[in-house]
Amino acid sequence: MSAERKREILGFAVAVAIVAALPVVTRSAYWLSIGVFIALHGIVAIGLGLLLGYAGQVSLGQAAFYGMGAYGSAILTLHLGCNPWLAMGAAAVATGLIAYVIGVPTLKLHGHYLAMATLGIGIIVRILFNEGGHITGGPSGLPAVPNLAIGGFAFDNDLRMYCLAWPIVFLQVVFSRNLLRSRLGRALRAIHDSEIAARSCAINTAKAKVMVFVLSAVYASVAGSLYAHWVNFVNPHPFSFPFSLELVVMVMVGGAASIWGPLIGAAALTIIDQSLLQLGHVFPIAEDLDIVLFGIIVVLVLLFMPRGLVRGLSSQEAERRAG
Amino acid sequence: MSLAELLQYLVTGVTVGSVYGLVALGFTIIYNATGIINFAQGEFVVLGGLIFYSLYVAAHLPLVAALVLAVAAVALIGVLMERLTIRPLINSPVVTLIIITVGVSVLLRGAAKLIWGPEALPVPPFSGEHSLFVGSVAVHLQYLWVLGLTVLAVVGLRLFFDHTIVGKAMQACAINSEAAQLAGISVSRMVQGSFALSAALSALAGIVICPITLASYDGGALLALKGFCGTIIGGLGNGLGAVMGGVIIGILEKLGIGFAPQGYAGYQDAFAFVVLLLMLFIRPSGLFGRQRTEGI
């Protein structure tokens, strides 16, 4: 077993241990719900990290895909009486298709049209949620979204949801890691180093980028569905542009070109967000600080640690060892 | 819809559209100098309006002084943005540069919310609440301010680029920055200049439109996007095309509201983006640009 592989397994084991420890240490609904939020945000961020770090493209509409998952689940279960699991799958497929339709024309273009196109999609989706009448429930949203359940066992509290969401995160980590070692993963690495060189090796660069983009949208949709079936309620507010930005911040803070980076970024930002919210009860100004703070964090991370916390720290460590 | 109504929508559309056009021009100037799509463009517009509010409404400065000072202040913010965030990263991948502009936009938006608060602020029209009647079409005097200043800015910019040494140097950088450098032009100074110019134009847009739309910290993203739609319609990098593109978006948007059935006015903001997506799908080089796509 190579040293790298040993380190990988050790890292994975540590992550699983930390996650498993939380419900043992505390059963407080508050902390468990933060744990679930980190998992959900982590699922979206890992997908966005693949897109950013490996395909070199940025999506500013990831919150919209998250929202499509949530609304897809809510609409299918409430209006059509669908089974929640089926609704989650159907929403993911639909979101993936939409991403494909956006991705094919924009990723074919040279440059960063995807960023603007996804920003546009984000705004359109938000308007559709708001103006959708009885289908989306308008600005007040849809209540009473059913829980996910296996047989008679419903994932109807924070602890149960925690135990459902995190295994999904770890499955996703393993899947993403294997994906990066596949033909597509090698193609993405080649694109990342030099798109022209990748093409001259007969790699279909546009197709590879579209696949990653679709995958990131599907991840976001799954997380959105989990969210809807957990809080049992959807409204347009959580799925708007600021959340898309926050997701980009999570990925940049953690480091895009690694799988753990975005997850760590998601944890950091979710905790900062919650702390500011708590602080806001005491100092009302703290709630307004979150936007500024996210901006400052992105700017500082990009300027001084452009590869994010994970890579930034490990490369500093490497430098220290070398020096 | 009667002819008068149609004309009314057209007048409104051209007015709003010329603001989008100014924003689109701002995008184009920075894009040409650096290849970056500046996501903080909308924040320049917003800051223009808000700073103008403080000077004109709160501090009772005369109109022209407030206008010039607000434009200068936002131009300075543009210069600072370039100096502090773009220049240190100028050799990074473009995606990093784009994300840092997103970061700056978030920062500016947050700062604006802290300073001016979350409420939209009313700014009185420059020449009072009067309208000019052309037949049965009412043209608010503020619309004339918007149109007049837009035309002035576009013509002024044309003269600047074609007839001054600095303008020509900036154009040279946009065409080929290495060659410009060899000819003794300081490219980094021109990039800085492009940020100042672009920020100033967007600030002007924000100032002239704020008596119509109110000045609010969170209007930036939407304006930036509509401006960007304009640049895409005009063909990315084509200045005059961008202005035309902005005007086209404005007209389409207002006509869209005019023709939409009752109860669908909420969709008006979606309209511009549907146009954006259609353009990206069908003719990404813009109406006035040459086709240049990469094969899949």
Image (cartoon, coloured by chain):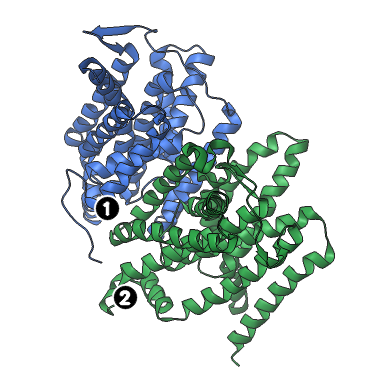
For the point 48% across and 50% down, the residue is: A64
Whole-percent x, y for residue A171 in the image? 60, 74
Instruction: For mark 2, name the chain.
Output: A
Q: Secondary structure at mark 2?
A: helix
Q: Is residue B127 above or below residue A70?
A: above
Rendering colour (chain A): green
Other residues around mark 1 within 10 Å, as few (<14) / some (14–19) / many (≥20): some
Checking the image for residue B281, the label placed there is: 1
The chain to which mark 1 is attached is B
Q: Is residue A31 above or below residue A174?
A: above
Q: Is residue A239 left or right of residue A182?
A: right
Q: Is residue B167 visible?
A: yes
Give the labeled residue for mark 2.
A198
Instruction: Find residue A125 and report its horizontal and vertical position in percent.
Output: 45, 45
Element type at mark 1: helix
Colour assigned to chain B in the rendering is blue
Query: Dividing the image into 4 quarters, which one contains the N terminus of chain B?
Result: top left
